[in-house]
Each structure stands twice: as C-alpha cells, then as structure tokens.
Amino acid sequence: MPKRILVVEDNDLNRKLFCDVLKANGFEVVPVAEGQNVIPAARKAMPDGVVLDIQLPDISGLDVIAAFRADSALRHIPILAVTAYAGKGDEEKIRAAGAKDYLAKPVSIMPFMAAVRGIMAGTPVAAH
Ligand code: MN
C-alpha cells in the first residue's frame, strides 16, 4: 500500500510541485491549501506523514504542529516543516514545536524526497 502524505501549502504552484514529486515517487497525496482544513483533513486521511508549509495565511504552521501534537489520534504522525524564512532560531522553534524535520525554501527535489522518506523511517505506518 502506498504511503499517504498530507501536503499543506497555500501556494498553488508549490503545492502542485510537492504533490507531483511525491506522486512520481509512488506516494499517495492529500493536498490542503488552508490551515483551518488541516486537522479535519488529517483526521479523515490518517496520513503516514505531513509536509507542512510554516507560512500559511490563516494560521501559523507552528500552531498546526501543536494541534497535531495535542491530538491523540494524530500526534504520532511525523511532520516535515518547510519554510521560506530560515532565520536564526527558526529551526529550533520548529523542532521544539514537534516537527520531525525541517527544510528551507526553495526546496530541491532530491533533498525534499530524502527528507520525506527520512521522517517516516522507523515510524509505524498509520492504519488506513
Ligand atoms: Mn505559504
């Protein structure tokens, strides 16, 4: 069974790129554009991993990470955070919030796929 990735990104081109790359690598994708839809979509899809843009217009990605960690059904799902603003201290904040890994934009395909596979390595596959 292909692994399922929730792709949270408000930018249409980036979201399509992430989804296309993941699909080309054999993953199933569930795209989400709005922060308010993330937790309901995650509860429905029960993804094996999440790619999460930290800069969303309606909610901070840090709050989205916290919402995953506070939800007993979702807290085990590994999150790969992606951010355009890699300021000093950002990585620590993102990891402290509970993201398993972190990539700075612009994201290249090979490091992206390596990071996606990396967050799921050694973690149990979610029951679909
Ligand atoms: Mn964004």
Image (spheres, helix red, strand yellow):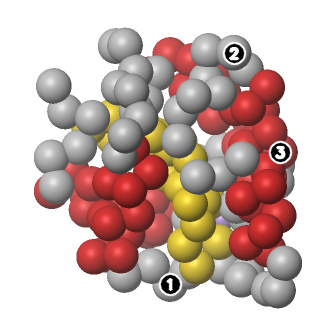
Report the Cα–Cα distance between label 2 and label 3.
16 Å
Q: Please name the residue that numbered disc 1 is placed on.
A: 106
Amino acid under disc 3: Asp
Is the CB–ligand 1 distance for label 3 below 8 Å? no
Instruction: Determine which of the numbered discs, if any, sits on residue 63 in the image.
Output: 3
Callout 3 secondary element: helix
Q: Is residue 101 left or right of residue 94?
A: left
Q: Which mark is residue 72?
A: 2
Q: CA distance from mark 1 to mark 3?
A: 22 Å
For marks 1 and 3 on the same chain, the one whose residue lies earlier in the sequence: 3
Is there a contact, CB below 8 Å, between mark 2 and mark 3? no
Q: Quadrant of ligand 1?
A: bottom right
Q: CA distance from mark 1 to mark 2?
A: 32 Å
Q: Residue at x 16, y 25 (%)?
A: 1
Question: In this view of the protein, which residue sits in the foreground, 69 or 83?
Answer: 69
- Give the amino acid type for the residue marked by disc 1 in the picture: Pro
Q: Position of residue 66 (x, y in %)?
A: 80, 39
Whether residue 97 is visible? yes
Foreground mark, 1 or 2? 2
Total label count? Answer: 3
Tag 1 near tag 3, CB within 8 Å: no
Helix, strand or loop at mark 1: loop
Q: Amino acid at mark 2?
A: Ser
Say whether disc 2 or disc 3 marks the residue closer to the N-terminus. Answer: 3
Residue 60 screen position, x and y as percent: 82, 54
> What residue is shown at x 44% (from left), y 51% (from top)?
119
Q: Residues within 10 Å of mark 3 (few under 14, many from 20)?
A: few
Residue at image x 84%, y 78%?
89
Q: Mark 2 packing: few (<14 Cα in 10 Å), some, or many (20+)? A: few
> Which residue is nearer to you in this view: 44 or 120?
120
